[in-house]
Image: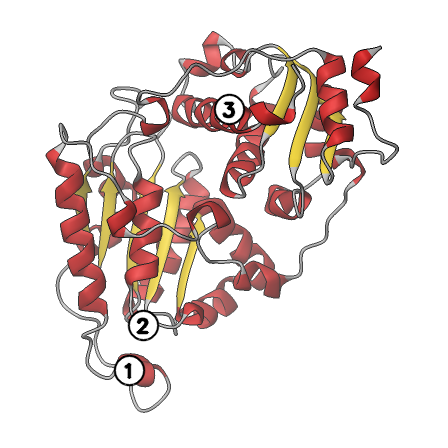
C-alpha cells in the first residue's frame, strides 16, 4: 500500500510513555516568553487599522517599559539598605481584550522591551505561577521574585477563588518590593458577553491590588482567523501514522489514551511532556467526555501552541472537541482559545501529511 511506503524504520515517540519530572529551579528559569514569542517586539505587532485601541496599546506599553528603565537606584535597592516605599500610582497594566487580539504578543513585547537582565524579569501564565508557589512555597516564591523589575502574568485564571486569593496575596507582596506587574486574564464563570473578561470584574476580583493596575482595552477579532484559510479536515488514521513515522521527533498516540495519560501527569509538567517534539500526531480524536478532561486538554493545547508544535490528527475536527454545554458554560473562553490554537497548529502541520 502506498501509505506504508512512507513509514520508516524509526518508530515515533509517544506522549503516553513520558513521565517527566521538573525540578523547581527549571520552573524559575523557564519564566520567560515561550519560544513562539521569542522574536516578538512592539514593532512586529501589526495593529488592525479598524481598531485604534491596538495602536494605543502599543504606545502605552512602550512608555511603560521605558519608565521601568528610569527608576532611580535600579535593582540595588533590593540588596542594600532599607527598602523604600513602593512608588505611588499604578504599578501595573492589565490588558483587557478577547482571545486572539494579540494580548500575549504585547505582553511578551513588554517583557523584551523592559531594560533589565532576563533573570530580573519574569513571564508566565497564571497556572505556571501557581505551580511555582506549589514547588517553592509562598515565602520562597516571594523572595525569589522580589528582586525582579517586572512580572508578566498571561491568562490570569479567575475560575478558582482559592488560587485567585493566593496569587493576589503574592502580587501584593511583590508590589511592596517594587516589582512592576502586567497581566491578561480569562473569563470568570458565567461571564459570557463578548468572550472577553471585563476590566472592572478583574479589578474587583484582585481587590486590594486594583489600585496598582491601569486597565488597557484592546479591541479586535481573533487574528488567527483574519483572512486565513479554513482549518484542514482531519486526516485518516493511515495518513496520521505515516506522518508520525516520516517526521523525525514526532509523537504518535491514540487520543483517548493521551487523555487518560494527562490525568496522571500534573499540568505543571505538560511543557516538559512536549520537550523536543517536532510534531504531535493523534489518531481517533473525539469529543472530550467531561470538564476535568477538557481543562487538562486546554493546558496541553497552550503548551503545544507556545512551543509551535504542529498537530496532525484523525477523527473529529477540533471545533467539535467540546460539547455545546461546555461551549456555553463558564469555561467557554478557555475552550474557544484551545480550538483556535489547535486549529492554527493543524494548519502548520499541513506539509507533514502526504496527500
Judging by the rendered image, the residue that carries numbered circle 1 is: 83
Of residues 271 and 240, which is closer to you in this image? 240
**Could you classify mark 3 by the number of other residues whose Cα lies within 10 Å: few (under 14), some (14-19), or many (20 or more)?**
some
Q: Residue furthest bottom?
A: 81
Q: CA distance from mark 2 to mark 1?
A: 7 Å
Q: CA distance from mark 2 to mark 3?
A: 44 Å
- Is residue 260 something one can see in this rendering? no
Give the residue displayed 31% in from the left and 91% down from the top: 81
Are dots 2 and 1 in contact, CB under 8 Å?
Answer: yes
SS for callout 3: helix
Q: CA distance from mark 1 to mark 3?
A: 51 Å
**Could you classify mark 2 by the number of other residues whose Cα lies within 10 Å: few (under 14), some (14-19), or many (20 or more)?**
many
Are dots 2 and 3 in contact, CB under 8 Å?
Answer: no
**Could you classify mark 1 by the number of other residues whose Cα lies within 10 Å: few (under 14), some (14-19), or many (20 or more)?**
few
Residue 347: give its label: 3
Q: Earlier in the sequence, mark 2 or mark 3?
A: 2
Residue 78 percent across, percent down from the top left: 34, 81
Which callout, 1 or 3, points to the residue nearer the camera?
3
Q: Earlier in the sequence, mark 1 or mark 3?
A: 1
Residue 177: give its label: 2
Q: Earlier in the sequence, mark 2 or mark 1?
A: 1
Give the residue displayed 44% in from the left and 37% down from the top: 160
Residue 308 percent across, percent down from the top left: 53, 39
Answer left or right for 215 relative to 112. left
Residue 167 percent across, percent down from the top left: 40, 52
Quarter in which the N terminus is drawn: top right
Answer left or right for 240 relative to 334. right
Amino acid at each position: 500500500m502506498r501509505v506504508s511506503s512512507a513509514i520508516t524504520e524509526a518508530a515515533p515517540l509517544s506522549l503516553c510513555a513520558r513521565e517527566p519530572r521538573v525540578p523547581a529551579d527549571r520552573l524559575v528559569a523557564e519564566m520567560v516568553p515561550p519560544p513562539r514569542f521569542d522574536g516578538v517586539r512592539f514593532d512586529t505587532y501589526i495593529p488592525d487599522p479598524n481598531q485604534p485601541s491596538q495602536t494605543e496599546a502599543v504606545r502605552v506599553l512602550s512608555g511603560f517599559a521605558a519608565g521601568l528603565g528610569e527608576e532611580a537606584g535600579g535593582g540595588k535597592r533590593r540588596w542594600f539598605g532599607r527598602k523604600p516605599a513602593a512608588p505611588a500610582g499604578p504599578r501595573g497594566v492589565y490588558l483587557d481584550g478577547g482571545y486572539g487580539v494579540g494580548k500575549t504578543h504585547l505582553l511578551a513585547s513588554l517583557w523584551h522591551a523592559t531594560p533589565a537582565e532576563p533573570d530580573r524579569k519574569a513571564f508566565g501564565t497564571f497556572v505556571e505561577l501557581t505551580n511555582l508557589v506549589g514547588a517553592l512555597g509562598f515565602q520562597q516564591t516571594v523572595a525569589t521574585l522580589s528582586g525582579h523589575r517586572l512580572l508578566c502574568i498571561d491568562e490570569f485564571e479567575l475560575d478558582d477563588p482559592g488560587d485567585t486569593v493566593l496569587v493576589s496575596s503574592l502580587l501584593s507582596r511583590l508590589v511592596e518590593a517594587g516589582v512592576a506587574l502586567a497581566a491578561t486574564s480569562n473569563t470568570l464563570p458565567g461571564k459570557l458577553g463578548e468572550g472577553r473578561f471585563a476590566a472592572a470584574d478583574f479589578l474587583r476580583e484582585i481587590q486590594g491590588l486594583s489600585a496598582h493596575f491601569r486597565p488597557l482595552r484592546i479591541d479586535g477579532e481573533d487574528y488567527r482567523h483574519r483572512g486565513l484559510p479554513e482549518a484542514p479536515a482531519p486526516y485518516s488514521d493511515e495518513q496520521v501514522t505515516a506522518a508520525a513515522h516520516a517526521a523525525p521527533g514526532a509523537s504518535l498516540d491514540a487520543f483517548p489514551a493521551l487523555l487518560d495519560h494527562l490525568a496522571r501527569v500534573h499540568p505543571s509538567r505538560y511543557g516538559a511532556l512536549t520537550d523536543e517534539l517536532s510534531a504531535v500526531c493523534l489518531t481517533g480524536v473525539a469529543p472530550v467526555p467531561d470538564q476535568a478532561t477538557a481543562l487538562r486538554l486546554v493546558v496541553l493545547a497552550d503548551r503545544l501552541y507556545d512551543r509551535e508544535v504542529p498537530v496532525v490528527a484523525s477523527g473529529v475536527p477540533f471545533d467539535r472537541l467540546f460539547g455545546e454545554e461546555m461551549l456555553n458554560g463558564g469555561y467557554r473562553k478557555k475552550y474557544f482559545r484551545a480550538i483556535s490554537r489547535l486549529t492554527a497548529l493543524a494548519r502548520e502541520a499541513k506539509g507533514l501529511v502526504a496527500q
